[in-house]
Image (cartoon, rainbow, N blue to C red):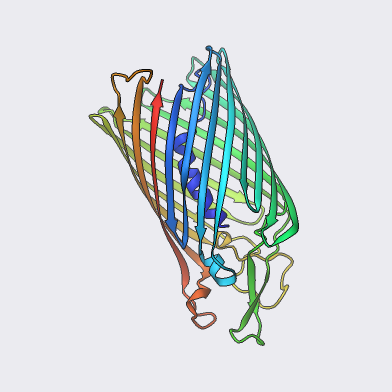
Amino acid sequence: MNKFNQYILMTIALFGLCQTASAGVLPEDRTDLLYHSFVGGGVEISGPSILVRKSIGSSVSLSANYYVDMISSASIDVITTASPYTEERTQYTLGVDYLRGNTTLSAGFTNSTESDFDSTTYNLSVSQDMFGDMTTLTLSYAYGDDTVRRSDDPTFFRDNTRQHYGIGLTQILTRNLIAALNFETITDEGFLNNPYRSVRYLDPGSAIGYSYEAELYPSTRTTNAIGIRAKYYLPYRAALEAQYRFFTDTWAIDANTVSIAYIHPWKEFIFTAKYRWHDQTGAHFFRDIFPRSEATNFRGRDKELSPLTSQTVKFAVAYELFSNGFGFIDKGTVNFSYDHLIVDYDEFRNASTGAVLGEEPLYQLKANIFQVFFSFWY
């Protein structure tokens, strides 16, 4: 399946649902009900999600999240070498936060299942408030174990393990300004490529001038990323938010991501407008077409390993419900967001157009992402 499109959707949806606990304060008791939709590049992904948080006493908070992706794919990767397919992925997460003084310990477990890919992740973090609650330091670790299969080969099993190390520092700088600095390292080891994807190479004996062979990735990858995020509260209850993130890995991919957002309240509404820009170099083993079969030790044609530039424009609105309470519900919100994504691939060409080899147009992905969710506090 197209893991990139799935990742985009999950990131956007889960960012709105699964807020990270702050040291010194347990997450509020709440329930979120979400429906998400991603349409673009021949891929359609949609499904529901539910998140429930509930405190036990004053020191423990439990959470549970259930998430479904229903996928229909006829992406550029699929139509050039395979047939369109449908897929369903289910994911559930269980978490616990324990508060003692100014320290919060958090642990979680996530399991994701689909027909040809299973993933299990365990995570642990500790956050500490310091200096009169003006500073919060967070250390985190996660371990993931993946199993990759092929739907057309019952004997195909490959493993991948992931380890994630993170450190974050949040600082209240002034009465109106708060900033966060985060650094993370991720190590992957095992089978890291897509078992269905192929690369193409020049083949004078082929009628179209090229043939396909299976891609082959390195068995290890280490990524490092550092990001800074700042939020400035304006006098009329609005806010400006800016983010910058630098990413680099051992596959020679360097990426810069910048975003800016404006949040504006009006009566019972909160409006958000956001722009995000992302630019990256390509992996050292990426080629749109190789000069011959097995031309290099490692070979990849995943478009997400190509040099690329993406832009995202986001609009969101939230409306407050039950401001005076309703039964056991203290308050609620209904939230709607729309993202328009454009990705320009600098070296990945659209081989499905039938154009002469070397003259195919560079591929561009356009996608629309919608999400609607209700939140209830009690």
Q: As displayed, is residue 133 above or below residue 124? A: above
- Residue in the picture at 32% in, 20% down: 326
Q: Is residue 168 visible?
A: yes
Q: Compare residues 33 and 21 and report the one nearer the observer.
A: 33
**Image spot of residue 35 (x, y percent):** 42, 42
Residue 141: name its quadrant.
top right
Q: As displayed, is residue 357 above or below residue 91? A: below
**Image spot of residue 2 (x, y percent):** 55, 57
Q: Compare residues 367 and 103 and report the one nearer the observer.
A: 367
Q: As displayed, is residue 164 above or below residue 253? A: above
Quadrant (top left, top right, bottom left, bottom right) of the N terminus = bottom right
**Image spot of residue 248 (x, y percent):** 60, 50
- Residue in the picture at 60% in, 32% down: 167
Q: As displayed, is residue 278 above or below residue 294? A: above
Q: Compare residues 319 and 209 and report the one nearer the observer.
A: 319
- Residue in the picture at 52% in, 26% down: 21
Q: Compare residues 55 and 357 and report the one nearer the observer.
A: 55
